[in-house]
Image (cartoon, coloured by chain):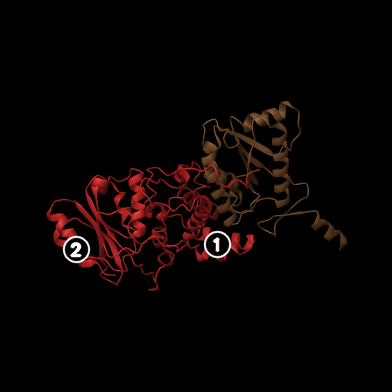
Amino acid sequence: METEVKEAQSKIVSAENPDLTAPADWQPVIMGILCNWCSYAGSDLTGTSRIQYPPNIRIIRVPCSSRVDPWFIIKSLQSTADGVLISGCHPGDCHYISGNYYARRRFLVTKKLLNFVGYHENRVQFSWVSAAEGPKFAKVVAKVTDDIKKLGPLHRYKKENF
Amino acid sequence: MDYSNQIREIASRLFTDNKIDYFVGYKQNSFDDSQVPFLFTDPAKISNLVFTEKSVFNLTNYLKPDHTKRKRVGLVVKGCDSRALNLMLTESQVKRENVYIIGICCEGVLNEKGEKAQNCVECVMSDPVVYDEILGTPSGKKGYTINADIKELADKSLTERADYFEDIFNNCIRCNACRHSCPLCYCAKCCIDQETSTLYHGANTSSGAMHALMTWSLHLAGRCVDCRNCEKACPSHLPLHLLHKQNESVIYENFQQHLAGMEKDDRGAFYKYSLSDPDDFIL
């Protein structure tokens, strides 16, 4: 009896689906969409500086954070990703002058809508990382990975289930 | 609210002056007391034209097809319809000189149960914002209230909400009637249809419906005028307004109380920005 309880505690319970659990050593897949001019260069700096960060993130490079259509986020969540991290230049630093201001509006509405239809708010996260912030990028990825590990696997609306 | 006679007079005058080729209005259904949108081409049939509180549809949707797009069209608009028309004019979908707009100061239309419809109870602008002729007395802009259904759902737990929406997405049959009935969904090729894998994204599953409806509502965010044409067209009677009203309330609260189509040359909340937009959710 005691061993059963211990087993249950060592499992990760899915935030959206409490019936669903994953083994304690489960590793999430995180979709990282990074802006070419700041965050992608920042992640490159993290690598060249030999800073360790979780390998769960799969990176896609886009020209600007405003290139990210909310559709990309929805499709990622429907495919293999358990979470999404989108990163761009700090406000005022955009290579295209105002792209990240437009993106910021879209991200807020997308995040609220996803939460409204039943995704945990930590599934989709956003960050501003500049080309000089290598250590910050490592910290952001560690935080996002940690958050999503706590939420457990995303089961709802996954296309593998159909 | 019965403007049938006045609209008939205006429409027949426009036809005799040769100002329009078509007139889009409502016609009484022969089998019950509901009304259907009707494209009047013959001035002799204008006597069939009606407009009462049962004229529920958004007629600006009939400016989308090829046969009306390059013609001179007269049409009747209520407050919400005129906001949609305003956006269509701004987005160059309709030429202003090609449309003759009869604006109605709307007192609210009825839903299927015969009560005042929810979007009319919560209506922000019942007067037309763009018109050539106006009927009725304007009552001015009203205060914004957050939709009652949104409030109720926001109080529920995450799992309850997720279950509720999974039911909605499960009942979607992917007929795309919502998209076709929306006056602001006019892309010749929709990104939702560009999927190579119809087995997954385009499939008739809750996953495919989630993908389609969420993308659709986010592409309309900041532009939706809450005319609820999509809901009236939906054969599964899905509460599609939930997604739109959620986006609208977030936009109203965070982006300088923006409401779609209220002003001329306003392209929607996502076509502009402010330096003071909230970014506390960004790491």
Tally of marks:
2
Residues at marks 1 and 2, CA–CA distance in whole angstroms: 45 Å
Three-letter amino acid code at the position of disc 2: Arg
Q: Chain of mark 2?
A: B
Secondary element under disc 2, as helix, strand or loop, is helix
Q: Residue at x 76, y 33 (%)?
A: A52
* Chain coloured red here: B
Mark number displayed over residue B8: 2
Q: Secondary structure at mark 1?
A: helix
Residue B167: mark in rendering: 1
Instruction: Identify which residue, B204 or B148, lies in the foreground.
Output: B148
Q: Is residue A48 visible?
A: yes
Query: Residue B107: percent from the left, percent from the top?
Result: 34, 67
Left/right placement of residue A99 relative to residue B37 reads right
Whole-percent x and y of residue B30?
25, 70
* Quadrant occupied by the C terminus of chain B: top right
Chain letter for the brown colouring in the rendering: A
On the image, the x and y values in percent for residue B83 come to 36, 54
